[in-house]
Amino acid sequence: MKKYVFALLTLAVAGSAMAQAAAAPTTVTGATGVPTMTVGNTLQTLTNGMTIPNGAQIVVPQGSAVSLNFGGSCAVTVPGGPFTATLANCQSLVAAQAAGTAPTYAGAASAITPLTVAAAVGGVAALSVATKSNNTPISNN
């Protein structure tokens, strides 16, 4: 029983740490045409005021546009094409637009931080310890 309590506490601490590391939400501040967002297996058309999860895959078809505000830290209008919604990509796009060059995106990997990795490793280790078995059969049948 103590093993399960330890595992649950470890996961709770990891989840709390990741929640504290989360930035203010990203919101759509303007959308024209049919820009879309994919999160997991769900495809949605972007509309003004919509909240965008970090790492969401955004596609802006030709003739469409979407403006995003990353919690006041960065604001950008995404041109046509694919875009992964992360603060690092927003900053890259803003810098590229100012310089008149093509942006270099960090991709979804920019959402992975050392804190996220540590929390995931700690959670897996805790579950491994909690579920470890001595391989003794339940019955001798």
Image (cartoon, rainbow, N blue to C red):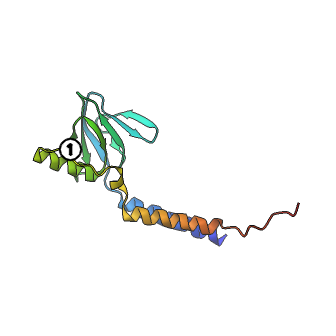
Query: Residue 128, relative to residue 91: is it above or below?
Result: below
Q: Is residue 59 left or right of residue 75?
A: right
Q: Residue furthest bottom?
A: 2
Residue 125, x across and y down, in percent = 55, 67
Residue at x-position 61% and y-position 69%: 129
Q: Nearer the viewer, residue 115 or 137?
A: 137
- Rendered image quadrant of residue 136: bottom right
Which quadrant holds the C terminus? bottom right
Element at badge 1? Answer: strand
- Rendered image quadrant of residue 17: bottom left
Q: Nearer the viewer, residue 65 or 139?
A: 139
Q: Is residue 28 left or right of residue 140?
A: left
Q: Residue furthest right?
A: 141
Please tell me how crowded label 1 is: few (under 14), some (14-19), or many (20+) other residues with Cα within 10 Å: some
Which residue in the structure is indicated by mark 1? 76
Q: Is residue 15 left or right of residue 140?
A: left
Residue at x-position 46% and y-position 64%: 119
- Rendered image quadrant of residue 22: bottom left
Residue 82, x across and y down, in percent = 30, 39
Please name the amino acid that badge 1 sits on.
Val
Query: Residue 110, relative to residue 44: is it above or below?
Result: below
